[in-house]
């Protein structure tokens, strides 16, 4: 995974709550068997509207998405994270994320930042008034900085460390191979098996 | 202090616990399908890794599979490649697969339980959010992303941070004509699509204890629509009776040992939930959604709400946008909403009891001329059972289309989709914009409401049909 330390970029203010993963990347895109090439599918239905915020030239090249509460609800599709990254987003800010989406984002180095609704509103107002405003998402200091905004955010220490170092979860877990084998040796025999091997 | 059901199952699966780190949890059953697994297998290949426990892994084809002409090559080349990729991956890595055309093929969350693989006290994961379905057995079951699929394939474990617990206590009995689907839609409307975020829900109380396994699966299935990590129901005699004798259920002495363990999987009397929601079953009625998320629902007897009455600004804006997308006006009675398509199926309501319920309503009646009705069994086994009972004949005689098993119109990855502007009454789980096809409009309903709606052409409950026949003069 690519490491994340700090990122500064312009913002796409997305004034919508309950942005579900079917909106982020519609199901017909999920037939692809790769992790890339999803950028054109990002918010595909909404992008048909020329007024949609992502279509506004002023926000072109922005790398931080600021959205309403309950971002990423619904399906577990990791394609939603890949689509945001393929499009160029490095971080997403919201007052609440769906659990599976949040987990997927942190495993891919897309930083998802939870800030209070008032701060989200402040960032919207700021970047709607002046789309050239830059926001810094600093994982080292656990802060979001913008003109007049200095907001601390929480992220559990372990997830933060993995992101900062860009660590591969599977390699970390495989260090515990002995513990896994020991657990397996003590599993009850009545547990289900899909086949005899 | 006592522990909740969820905490007991969690504790029994901790491989490693260390201060300041997520617990490393062992996974008893890993289910796979074609959509969220190809990139995970690719990852294994790139790192030269194998599947650690092929005997705890099972794959089925469901999301892309057509429900017509299944004996012909799949028309969509991209879907075909995805299914072929799963077949190759399963062959290369030694994973048991039930492909299209196999008698055990079907929606992954229907297949696991019917094979007896989903058992109390197990941890079950799948790259699919509706994995919460399996919690109906007292399993800790949750959806994961593709990176986690790869992690489980390689290690049979997942690092997981602890969750909070929420009791959803449903007192009393469900009134006649009110189903598990109505109950869960009412729960989601009550706590909201983010209300369960960070929680495992435990459904309990008299109304839950009286439900069949299939009804319990419908409830746990939609826990994710309230934002929950998982939903669970304590195993009891209903659970044991369902499992006994199934292909992959324990046999002989193993069965006795298993049941002894399963009986310990109840929340202790002195356990404390982080939150509790109490629902009176007797107050519930058939429930439908009017908006574009599963929390935007109301009793069928109600009218489309006025967004101006929502106190929260975010909810008000969401309701305005939803009504605009759905083509509905505030104050319009929900019973007046005419639909074009009725879909009965999915991991939520595609099991035999669901098909029986819909068939019972349709028996001797016909689907309105304006309506296209699709009935898609959740698995081949469900389909065979329905045919043996003659349910397929009831559906086709009424004018509905009887299809092959799969996810179908729940998410429209195969050709079964809504056209732009088309409106459905659907027994599936999500009414998101465009979920069932670009521009499609979805109302989530129970199988009974779906069938009554098909007959009348507008949202309706079976009681509306009997009211009609009661009003028919004698001799006519």
Image: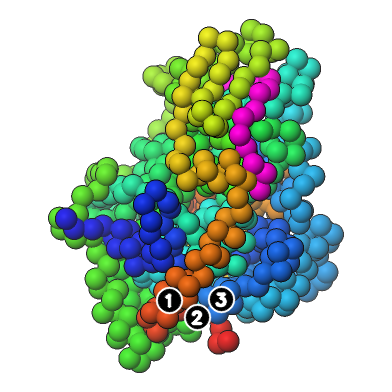
Instruction: Report if residue B2 lies within the magenta region.
Output: no
**Which element is circle 3 on?**
loop
Residue annotated with mark 1 = A182
Q: Is residue A140 above or below residue B386?
A: above
Disc 2: which chain? A
Asked if one can make out residue B285 in the rendered structure from this viewpoint, the answer is yes
The mark lying in front, picked from 1 and 2, is: 1
The first of marks 1 and 2 along the sequence is 1
Q: Closer to the camera, B109 or A15? A: A15
Residue for point 69% across, 37% down: A84
Chain part drawn in magenta? A1-20
Q: Which residue is mark 2?
A: A193
The relative height of residue B279 versus residue B124 in the rendered view (above or below) is above
Residue depicted at 56% across the width and 35% down the height:
A112
Q: Which residue is mark 3?
A: B53
Q: Residue at x 58, y 26 (%)?
A: A137
How far is disc 1 from disc 2 in space, using C-alphas? 18 Å
Dot 1: what SS?
A: helix
């Amino acid at each position: 995974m690519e490491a994340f330390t700090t990122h500064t970029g312009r913002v796409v203010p997305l004034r919508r709550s309950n942005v579900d993963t079917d909106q982020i990347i519609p199901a017909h895109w999920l037939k692809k068997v790769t992790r890339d090439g999803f950028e054109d599918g990002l918010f595909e239905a909404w992008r048909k509207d020329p007024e949609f915020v992502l279509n506004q030239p002023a926000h072109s090249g922005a790398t931080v998405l600021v959205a309403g509460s309950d971002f990423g609800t619904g399906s577990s599709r990791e394609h939603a994270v890949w689509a945001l990254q393929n499009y160029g987003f490095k971080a997403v800010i919201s007052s609440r994320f769906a659990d599976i989406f949040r987990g997927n984002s942190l495993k891919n180095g897309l930083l998802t930042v939870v800030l209070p609704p008032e701060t989200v509103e402040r960032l919207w107002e700021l970047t709607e008034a002046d789309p050239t405003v830059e926001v810094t998402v600093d994982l080292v200091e656990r802060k979001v900085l913008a003109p007049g905004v200095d907001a601390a955010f929480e992220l559990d220490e372990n997830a933060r460390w993995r992101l900062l170092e860009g660590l591969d979860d599977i390699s970390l877990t495989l260090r515990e191979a002995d513990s896994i084998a020991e657990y397996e040796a003590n599993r009850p025999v009545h547990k289900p098996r899909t086949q005899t091997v | 202090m006592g522990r909740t059901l969820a905490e007991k199952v969690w504790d029994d699966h901790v491989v490693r616990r260390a201060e300041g780190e997520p617990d490393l949890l062992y996974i008893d059953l890993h289910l796979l399908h074609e959509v969220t697994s190809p990139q995970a297998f690719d990852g294994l290949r790139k790192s030269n890794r194998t599947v650690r426990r092929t005997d705890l892994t099972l794959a089925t084809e469901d999301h892309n599979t057509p429900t017509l002409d299944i004996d012909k090559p799949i028309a969509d080349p991209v879907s075909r490649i995805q299914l072929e990729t799963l077949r190759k991956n399963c062959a290369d890595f030694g994973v048991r697969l039930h492909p299209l055309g196999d008698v055990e093929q079907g929606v992954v969350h229907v297949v696991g339980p019917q094979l007896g693989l989903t058992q109390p006290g197990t941890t079950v994961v799948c790259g699919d959010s509706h994995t919460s379905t399996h919690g109906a057995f007292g399993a800790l079951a949750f959806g994961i992303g593709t990176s986690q699929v790869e992690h489980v394939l390689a290690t049979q474990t997942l690092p997981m941070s602890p969750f909070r617990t929420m009791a959803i206590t449903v007192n009393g009995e469900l009134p006649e004509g009110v189903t598990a689907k109505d109950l869960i839609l009412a729960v989601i409307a009550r706590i909201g699509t983010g209300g369960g975020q960070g929680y495992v829900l435990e459904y309990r109380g008299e109304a839950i204890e009286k439900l069949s396994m299939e009804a319990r699966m419908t409830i746990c299935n939609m826990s994710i629509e309230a934002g929950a990590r998982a939903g669970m129901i304590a195993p009891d005699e209903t659970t044991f009776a369902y499992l006994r004798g199934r292909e992959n259920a324990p046999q002989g002495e193993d069965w006795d040992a298993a049941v002894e363990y399963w009986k310990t999987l109840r929340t202790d009397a002195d356990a404390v939930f982080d939150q509790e929601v109490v629902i009176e079953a007797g107050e519930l009625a058939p429930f439908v959604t009017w908006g574009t998320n599963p929390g935007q629902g109301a009793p069928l007897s109600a009218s489309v709400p006025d967004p101006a009455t929502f106190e929260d600004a975010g909810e008000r804006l969401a309701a305005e946008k939803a009504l605009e997308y759905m083509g509905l006006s505030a104050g319009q009675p929900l019973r007046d909403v005419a639909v074009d398509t009725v879909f009965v199926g999915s991991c939520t309501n595609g099991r035999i009891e669901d098909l029986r319920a819909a068939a019972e309503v349709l028996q001797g009646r016909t689907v309105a001329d304006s309506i296209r009705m699709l009935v898609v069994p959740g698995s081949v086994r469900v389909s065979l059972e329905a045919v043996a009972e003659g349910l397929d004949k009831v559906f086709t005689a009424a004018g509905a289309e009887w299809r092959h098993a799969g996810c179908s119109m729940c998410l429209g990855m195969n050709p079964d989709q809504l056209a732009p502007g088309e409106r459905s009454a659907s027994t599936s789980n999500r009414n998101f914009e465009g979920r069932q096809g670009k521009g499609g409009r979805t109302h989530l309903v129970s199988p009974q409401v779906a069938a009554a709606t098909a007959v009348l052409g507008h949202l309706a409950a079976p009681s509306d049909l009997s009211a009609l026949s009661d009003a028919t003069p004698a001799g006519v």
